[in-house]
Image (cartoon, grey):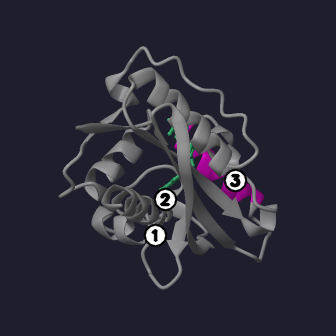
Amino acid sequence: AYIVVATSNAHKVEEYAKLLEGQKVELKSLLDYPNFPGVEEDGATFRENAAKKALAACRYCDVPAFADDSGLEVEALEGRPGIFSARYAPTDKERIAKLLEELKDKENRRARFVCAIAIAINGEVIETFEGEVKGSIVDAPRGADGFGYDPIFLPDGYDQTFGEMPQELKNRISHRAAAFKMALNFVEDEMSV
Ligand code: ITT
């Protein structure tokens, strides 16, 4: 049996492949469905966008699907870029440069990554979950691992950014890991009743 993760982001696929290691289910993604028409992410929340993506993938691929909508909320920017994290600027490099520029004179560097996961089965969204990791934005990018805003995000309690730490460590403490844990518990409970 397999499950589809409703994402075209290869970095997310890689992280989920690791998170699903040892599980009985095989993982596919929208990279395996090149003709998938895509979804307009016009929801007002991470959960709404995740639900839209999961539902569309579940219906299109005709198998259970889950989706991840995620982003970075920065306190000094009233939560921006938030659900617009992917659209904040055209490339990772430009996104990071723009964010550091906006934070140039700000003392408050607090931020959090958020990840919403929605699960869709038989053409319906059955549940959504949200995970977070708190931290702060460093002054200049550090590390080349990970993706997106990883090089400028320093999780609380660690001295390496997400771009510096081993993928295995990010995968234990991240917003994505937190949301995924809840989703997995839910699925395991559902299947045992
Ligand atoms: P899909 O919609 O196909 O899943 P996407 O990259 O467009 O891919 P989102 O709409 O959820 O996904 O946007 C999430 C953005 O938030 C992502 O592009 C990154 O810029 C940022 N982001 C999310 N999780 C991240 C992480 O673990 N590390 C760094 N940046 C992250």
Alpha-carbon span between mark 1 and mark 2 = 7 Å
| For the residues bearing labels 3 and 1, Cβ distance under 8 angstroms | no
Disc 1 residue crowd, few under 14, some 14–19, many 20+, Cα 10 Å:
many
Give the image quarter of residue 169: bottom left
Residue displayed at 52% across by 72% down? 154
| For the residues bearing labels 1 and 2, Cβ distance under 8 angstroms | yes
Give the image quarter of residue 138: bottom right
For the view shown, which residue lies furthest in the top direction?
Answer: 35
Instruction: Residue 121: say if magenta.
Output: no
Question: Is residue 12 among the parts visible in the rendering?
Answer: yes
**Residue receiving disc 2:** 150
The N terminus is located in which quarter? top left
Q: Is residue 113 left or right of residue 102?
A: left
Q: Earlier in the sequence, mark 3 or mark 1?
A: 3
Name the amino acid, label 1: Thr
Q: Which label sits on residue 161?
A: 1
Does the closest atom of ligand 1 sit within 8 Å of the Cβ of label 2?
yes
| For the residues bearing labels 3 and 2, Cβ distance under 8 angstroms | no
**Residue receiving disc 3:** 82
Of 15 and 145, the residue lying toward us: 15
Of 11 and 144, the residue lying toward us: 11
Residue displayed at 54% across by 23% down? 38
* Residue range highlighted in magenta: 91-102
SS of the residue under disc 1? loop
Name the amino acid, label 2: Asp
SS of the residue under disc 3? helix
Q: Earlier in the sequence, mark 3 or mark 2?
A: 3
Name the amino acid, label 3: Gly
